[in-house]
């Protein structure tokens, strides 16, 4: 069953602005992962954050994890038109054959 | 060298036909997956193999049959294609279950 839920479903911003996407989940996790999918392409891994971590950075990306609220956020700073894509969160649940449970994605449009 | 490659990229076929999609990874990973992504971008796990053993078999019609001849390959055979099978099918691999997944470029299947 799908447990990750991203919000917003769609986000439109201007170049240079920051974009924040949220992901909520329902059960205990080992890790939470964020992926990007450009139109017509496969998904690309961005960041993995483990359940005992609270924040991770990678370039212009910042991911936070709040296990008490069962939520994560992905912040993209100083956005660029090339950041236009769909962003998915996926959780590695404890047990459950370790399959990733995927969210429905946030569609981000960065306007030049 | 493409890490996860799947063929064909596009597949257009008539209802009732049988077709196969092939996937190969050169990352030395133990785990491979098949996903179906519908027009709303919902990503649904179909199957997963770990060391050639089937570990995830979601609620998928038995017209879909995966085959893993070795750890580097996971093929998907679909019998008696139906209109509802039209979607993009993604192959992915990971070091082990629950870990970061690497996706192929996708196979866009259109059933007419």
Image (spheres, coloured by chain):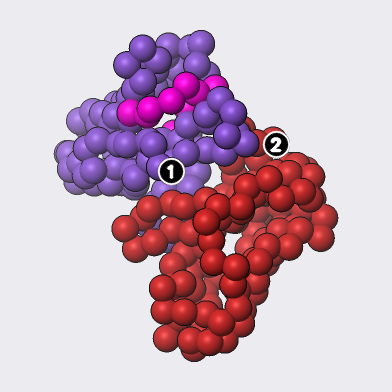
Chain colours: A purple, B red
Where residue B50 appears, as percent x and y from the top left, is 73, 44
Q: Nearer the viewer, residue A66 or B56?
A: B56
The answer to whether residue A6 is visible is yes
Where residue A54 appears, as percent x and y from the top left, is 43, 11
Residue annotated with mark 1? A1
The answer to whether residue A62 is visible is no
Where residue A60 appears, as percent x and y from the top left, is 38, 26
Q: Residues within 10 Å of mark 2 (few under 14, many from 20)?
A: some
Question: Considering the numbered disc 1 on the image, is that residue within a helix, a strand or a loop?
Answer: loop
Where residue A24 appears, as percent x and y from the top left, is 33, 28
Distance between the alpha carbons at the discs numbered 2 and 1: 23 Å
Q: Is residue B100 magenta?
A: no
Residue annotated with mark 2? B95
Q: Is residue A34 magenta?
A: yes
Q: Nearer the viewer, residue B95 or A102?
A: A102
Q: Nearer the viewer, residue A45 or A26?
A: A26
Residue B90: which quarter of the image?
bottom right
């Amino acid at each position: 069953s799908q447990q990750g839920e991203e919000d917003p479903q769609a986000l439109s911003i201007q170049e240079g602005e920051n974009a924040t996407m949220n992901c909520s989940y329902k059960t205990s996790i080992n890790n939470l992962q964020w992926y990007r999918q450009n139109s017509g392409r496969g998904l690309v891994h961005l960041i993995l954050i483990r359940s005992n971590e609270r924040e991770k950075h990678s370039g212009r990306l910042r991911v936070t994890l709040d296990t008490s609220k069962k939520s994560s956020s992905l912040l993209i700073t100083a956005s660029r038109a090339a950041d236009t894509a769909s962003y998915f969160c996926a959780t590695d649940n404890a047990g459950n054959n370790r399959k990733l449970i995927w969210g429905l994605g946030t569609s981000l449009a960065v306007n030049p | 060298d493409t890490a996860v490659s799947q063929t064909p990229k596009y597949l257009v076929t008539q209802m009732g036909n049988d077709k196969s999609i092939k996937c190969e990874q050169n990352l030395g990973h133990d785990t491979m997956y098949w996903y179906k992504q519908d027009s709303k971008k919902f990503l649904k796990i179909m199957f997963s193999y770990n060391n050639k053993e089937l570990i995830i078999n979601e609620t998928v019609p038995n017209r879909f049959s995966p085959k893993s001849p070795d750890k580097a390959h996971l093929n998907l055979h679909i019998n008696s294609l139906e209109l509802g099978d039209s979607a993009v099918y993604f192959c992915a691999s990971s070091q082990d279950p629950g870990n970061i997944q690497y996706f192929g470029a996708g196979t866009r299947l259109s059933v007419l």
